[in-house]
Image: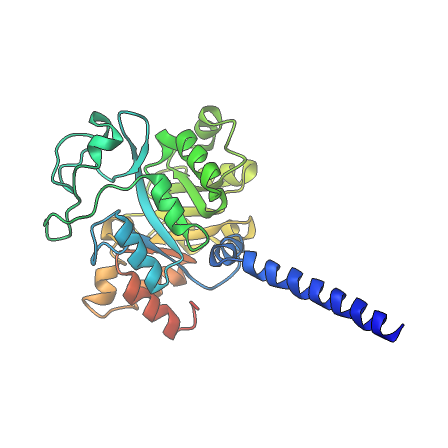
């Protein structure tokens, strides 16, 4: 009887250990980031790398995304386009002229034809890197990091199918400048099934009403606030955004998006008070940057990023 009890206990303990081990194995870094993204009152700053780490690799390349993940960003930003044969690819510009050794629009080529071109680095030199597909990117980052789908509005349905097929739907943030009614009308079948962020131009009239309208109907996970002037009342009183369940996203990359409180002010001029400090003081808990390495170092010193 004693031996039977010992065996029974051993079996139970083994089962518990196996369950716990499997549970932990299924929890990824992306799971933690998804949880963090949906905590609007969390004061830790999430960092989004604009087009990946484009200073060390061609923008919007798999290598740029690998480098960005290696330095510890939370989100990579990329831009969507589509080939002649309907494949969603990563390309910022309407044409491939600036970023590759080819000419024309992605829509002029099949994927096989497009893959024959090579991406240029920041100095304009042609590299071995090719234009990635959205599927290739999502397979690369699955379980590791979140993704911000810029220029994605025309391709929501196609992107949705790729994300579902790769099991990465919860890692992706869809975004647009369009008002709620337009998005609801164009994408009624998926709008309630995606993680969504509205882009708001604070320099335009009706910005607050647009935010409130979105929060009344679908509660976006975040609002990307862009502004050429830093005089908007929303910048001084935006706590209602967090209270209603959304994070505030501010871009530090270009002065035109943040009234001059930008990355270059922080890094090249050494003035974080007038740049990153200012952005954080005005409610941002997600910052999209062209200087991810430097921003992460700065945030970690302030205990604002793990």
Residue 140 placement (x, y as % from top left): 37, 49
Q: Is residue 127 left or right of residue 150?
A: left
Q: Is residue 21 left or right of residue 122?
A: right
Question: 93 or 171: nearer the eye?
Answer: 171
Which residue is pictured at 53% across the width and 36% down the height?
193
**Side of 144 relative to 264 (left or right):** right
Residue at image point 50% right, 53% down:
34
> Residue 276's x, y, as percent?
32, 63
Q: Which residue occupies the foreground of this view, 136 or 301?
A: 136
Furthest residue in direction right, as rendered:
1
Locate residue 135, reporting x and y percent.
37, 40
Colouring scheme, one of rainbow, by chain, secondary structure, one colour: rainbow
Foreground of the two, 14 or 257:
14
Q: What x and y, as percent, mark residue 197?
A: 44, 43
Q: Residue at x 22, y 66 (%)?
A: 267
Q: In this rendering, is residue 248 above or below 208?
A: below
Question: Could you tell me which residue is drawn at 52 percent across and 27 percent down?
Answer: 189
Above/below status of 271 relative to 47: below
Quadrant of the image occupied by residue 25: bottom right
Q: Quadrant of the C terminus?
A: bottom left
Is residue 289 visible to the viewer in this orientation of the structure? Answer: yes
Q: Is residue 206 above or below residue 276?
A: above
Residue 94 shows up from this direction: no
167 up-or-down from 296: above or below: above
């Amino acid at each position: 009887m004693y031996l039977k009890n010992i065996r029974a206990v051993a079996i139970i303990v083994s089962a518990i250990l196996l369950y716990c081990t499997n549970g932990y194995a299924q929890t990824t870094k992306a799971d933690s980031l998804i949880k963090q993204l949906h905590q609007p009152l969390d004061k830790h700053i999430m960092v989004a790398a604009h087009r990946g780490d484009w200073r060390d690799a061609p923008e919007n390349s798999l290598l740029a995304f690998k480098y960005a993940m290696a330095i510890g960003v939370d989100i990579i930003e990329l831009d969507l386009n589509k080939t002649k044969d309907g494949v969603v690819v990563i390309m910022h510009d309407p044409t491939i002229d600036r970023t590759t050794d080819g000419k024309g629009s992605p829509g002029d080529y099949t994927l096989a034809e497009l893959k024959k071109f090579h991406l240029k680095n920041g100095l304009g030199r042609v590299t071995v890197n090719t234009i990635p597909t959205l599927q290739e990117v999502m397979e690369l980052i699955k379980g590791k990091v979140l993704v911000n789908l810029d220029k994605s509005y025309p391709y929501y349905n196609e992107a949705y199918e790729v994300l579902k097929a790769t099991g990465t739907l919860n890692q992706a943030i869809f975004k647009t400048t369009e008002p709620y009614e337009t998005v609801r009308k164009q994408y009624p079948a998926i709008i309630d099934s995606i993680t969504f962020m509205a882009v708001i131009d604070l320099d335009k009239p009706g910005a607050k009403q647009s935010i409130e309208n979105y929060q009344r109907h679908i509660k976006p996970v975040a609002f990307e606030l862009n502004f050429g002037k830093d005089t908007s009342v929303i910048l001084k009183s935006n706590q209602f955004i967090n209270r209603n369940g959304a994070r505030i996203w501010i871009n530090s990359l270009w002065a035109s998006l943040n009234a001059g409180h930008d990355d270059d002010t922080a890094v090249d001029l050494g003035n974080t008070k007038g740049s990153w400090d200012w952005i954080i003081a005005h409610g941002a808990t997600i910052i999209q940057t062209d200087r991810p390495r430097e921003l992460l170092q700065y945030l970690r010193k302030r205990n604002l990023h793990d």
